[in-house]
Amino acid sequence: MPPVIDRKKCVKCGYCAQICPLDVIKVIEKEDFKDIVVKYPDECWHCRACEKDCKADAIRIRYPLSHLMLHMEPDREGRK
Ligand code: SF4
Ligand code: SF4
């Protein structure tokens, strides 16, 4: 699941694209046009670096369902 950028809050500083270790977020720049896009959403590993460091508080990470499930290890007798 990709990060979601709130277009109303984003100031297009490009910092999230700089710090993303997997280049999920890209800055598109052409003459007087600049935009921030989530280009490779499937590559996101949910480290939250972009979300935490966005000064405009414009990014939220959507976690896949598998990340939200509670995993319990069985005890020695095999009970959960
Ligand atoms: S760091 Fe935040 S404000 Fe800057 S481009 Fe990314 S989402 Fe937008
Ligand atoms: S959560 Fe981490 S991997 Fe995903 S887009 Fe943000 S910085 Fe990149």
Image (cartoon, rainbow, N blue to C red):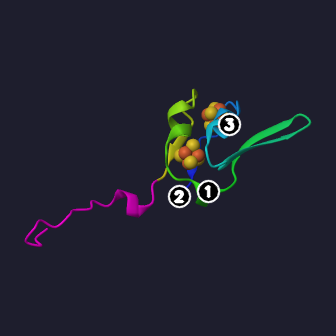
The magenta stretch is: 63-80
Residue ID for mark 2: 1
Please say if the residues under marks 2 and 3 sit with CB atoms less than 8 Å apart. Answer: no
Q: Please, which residue is most extreme toward the front here?
A: 76
Residue 45 in picture, x, y percent from top left: 52, 53
Name the residue that disc number 1 marks: 41
Task: Please name which of the two marks, 2 or 3, marks the residue nearer to the observer.
Answer: 3
Magenta-drawn stretch, dominant element (helix, strand or loop): loop
Residue type at the position of mark 1: Pro
Residue 6 occupies quadrant: top right
> Residue 13, percent across and down?
70, 30
* Disc assigned to residue 5: none
Q: Amino acid at mark 2?
A: Met
> Element under label 1?
helix
Left or right: 79 in relation to 34:
left
Q: Nearer the viewer, mark 3 or mark 1?
A: 3
| Mark 1, other Cα within 10 Å: few <14 / some 14–19 / many ≥20 | some
Tags 1 and 2 in contact by the CB under 8 Å rule? yes
**Residue at 66% across, 32% down:** 15
User: Which of the marked residues, 1 or 2, is nearer the chain's N terminus?
Assistant: 2
Residue at point 57%, 36% (across, down): 58
Query: Is residue 74 in view?
Result: yes
* Residue 8 visible to an observer of this rendering: no
Is residue 69 covered in magenta? Answer: yes
Earlier in the chain: of badge 2 and badge 3, it is: 2
Q: Quadrant for the C terminus, please.
A: bottom left
Across and down, in percent, residue 56 comes to 58, 28
Q: Nearer the viewer, residue 8 or 12?
A: 12
